[in-house]
Image (tube, rainbow, N blue to C red):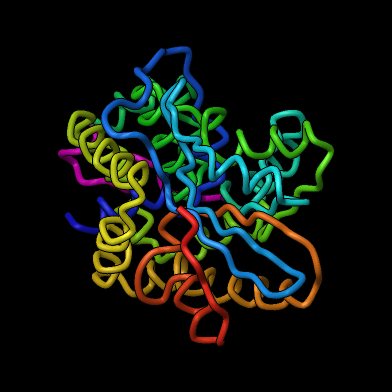
Amino acid sequence: MRLLNILRRAAVALGIATTAAGCSSAATTAASSGPAPRPALWQVADKDTTIYLFGTIHLLPQQYQWRTAKFDDAVNRANGLVVETIIDPANPAPLAQAMAQLGLGANLPPLASRVPAEKRAALDAAIRTSGYPAAVFDRMETWAAAVTLLGTQFKSFGLEGEEGVETTLRNSFKGSGKPIGQLETNAEQLGFFDRLPEQAQRDLLLSALDDPAGARKQFDAMLASWSRGDVGAIARSFNEEMASSPPLKDALLTQRNRNWAGWIERRMAQPGTVMVAVGAGHLAGSGSVLDLLEKRGLKVTRVQ
């Protein structure tokens, strides 16, 4: 089902706070191979302001090599960093509170009743693998159960939120004593998923139960497109396929792109240099943050 593919991609390159935070593994995955990486990097600049725009991928294998000299130069020039949302392992309270407030409900039907009968064995297996008691999942909103199980699925691939681009960048800027901001709070980001129609939430849950081999193949293709800076392939993965689910596209892509383009336009009125790092799906194709900025009269230049 096309929607299932979209939702899994969204977990990696559009932003799901709980997946990124909860995905951790001691498994070692081979570093990148093949052509030298060159993830896409842009800038919007005037006489006294430069904003670097970098499309990220939220989960990466351990020791995956993706940084370049041009990217590191931009990091060194930037006086601050802005990410989608800050997930701080040293202060997990905001995310935990948002999940408790939005992700748990009363008088919900058992999670098993929210999937077709033929998927219940796969659901049972996924819950056992997660390490959480089955009763915990019965108290979860469907989307919250889905992203928790998606985190378990990504963990089985050896993918780590701690290896993701945002975490690496936050550590770099924090180590240099540079400020770090966010475009959305944890609660605001999770709210986009909480407001999805129940059927879309159940489709997301089904995507967490898909064949791991197929899911890994899909992730590898997405990672390859990101690493080589193939914005066209990224756009096809997100923008075109999301046309099959207008509510999902509006919640996860359209609204957020509009909000962030407005923030960048306002920030251009202040002098200085800043790096904005958001999921790569937000910087690709028609209706992307870049597209909206150009329509507002700002010049966007690709740096890498």
Q: Quadrant of the N terminus?
A: bottom left
> Which quarter of the figure has residue 223?
top left
Check the image and report above or below for 101 versus 300.
above
Q: Residue at x 25, y 32 (%)?
A: 216
Quarter of the rendering containing residue 293: bottom right
Residue 8 x, y percent position in the rendering? 33, 47
Residue occupying image coordinates x 47% and y 69%: 251
Residue 27 at least partly seen: yes
Is 286 positioned to the left or the right of 260 in the image? left
Q: Position of residue 271 (x, y in %)?
A: 81, 69
Residue 113 visible in rendering: no
Percent position of residue 158, x then y = 39, 21
Q: Residue at x 69, y 34 (%)?
A: 172
Q: Is residue 109 magenta?
A: yes
Q: Which residue is rendered at x = 24% and y = 70% of the image? A: 244
Which sits in the foreground, 93 or 237? 237
Residue 85 magenta-drawn?
no
Vertical side of 214 occupied by 29: above or below: above
Front residue of 75/165: it is 75
Q: What stretch of residues is rendered in magenta?
A: 105-120
**Residue 162 picture location, percent across and down:** 57, 28
